[in-house]
Image: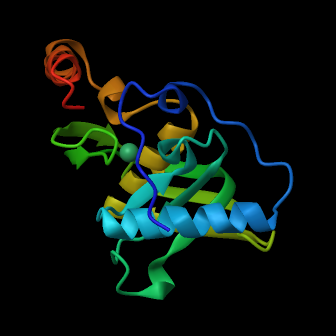
Amino acid sequence: MIRPIVKFGGDTLHRPAEAIQTITADLAALARDMIDTMHAAPGIGLAAPQLGVPIRLFVVDLSLGHNPQELIALVNPVFVEREGMQLEEEGCLSLPGFNATVARPERATVKGLDLEGREHFYSGDGLLARAFQHEMDHLDGRVFIDRLRGVKRSLILHRIRKRMRKGAW
Ligand SMILES: [Zn+2]
């Protein structure tokens, strides 16, 4: 089921998410909704706080739904390794219409549990490493513009506030 995506300003986007204690049928249903919502957007990643649920779960799919092998759903993910640095344009389904160049690790390995409770490790570089870091940031209550400095961040914030005032956010 496709669910509405919480936009910048929504409470769950700006505070750290809680660790998941038990993997339940409800959690698996939420993960399916996250995948449906991500594919419909379309986007390459979505974190549970973006659906208003402040728990540590994210989904990533660089194939946009074309290759089930590329679909990753991780419960309580943590970084095992991060190295290097890349600078690329990035956006977020919670900040529609905005993007900016954000520094991210060039390579990253994450580990976490799948929806059956089995541990998995995923390593990626380039876009996949960027997606991991972006989604992990969501679980820590951070969005990509929080990684920007000074005038760039202020400019985007100013535009978002303008849209909020107009009721167009
Ligand atoms: Zn995002």
Q: In which quarter of the image is residue 167?
A: top left
- Residue furthest toward the right? 22
Left or right for 102, reference 81? left
Q: Position of residue 34 (x, y in %)?
A: 51, 61
Query: Which sits in the foreground, 54 or 103?
Result: 54
Instruction: Give the answer, above or below, for where 154 lies relative to 98.
Output: above
Q: How many marks?
A: 0
Residue name at image x 21 percent, y 12 percent: 150
Instruction: Give the answer, above or below, for where 60 lies relative to 82.
Output: below
Q: Where is residue 35 in the image (x, y as percent from the top left)?
A: 49, 68
Q: In which quarter of the image is residue 134?
A: top left
Residue name at image x 44 percent, y 64 percent: 2
Q: State the scheme by which the image is colored.
A: rainbow
Left or right for 168, reference 13? left
Query: Which sits in the foreground, 120 or 114?
Result: 114
Q: Position of residue 52 (x, y in %)?
A: 54, 41
Residue name at image x 52 percent, y 30 percent: 141
Q: Where is residue 27 in the image (x, y as percent from the top left)?
A: 72, 61
Q: In which quarter of the image is the C terminus?
A: top left
Residue 113 in sight here: no
Residue 77 in sight here: yes
The quadrant where ligand 1 appears is top left
Residue name at image x 75 percent, y 42 percent: 19
- Residue furthest toward the front? 167
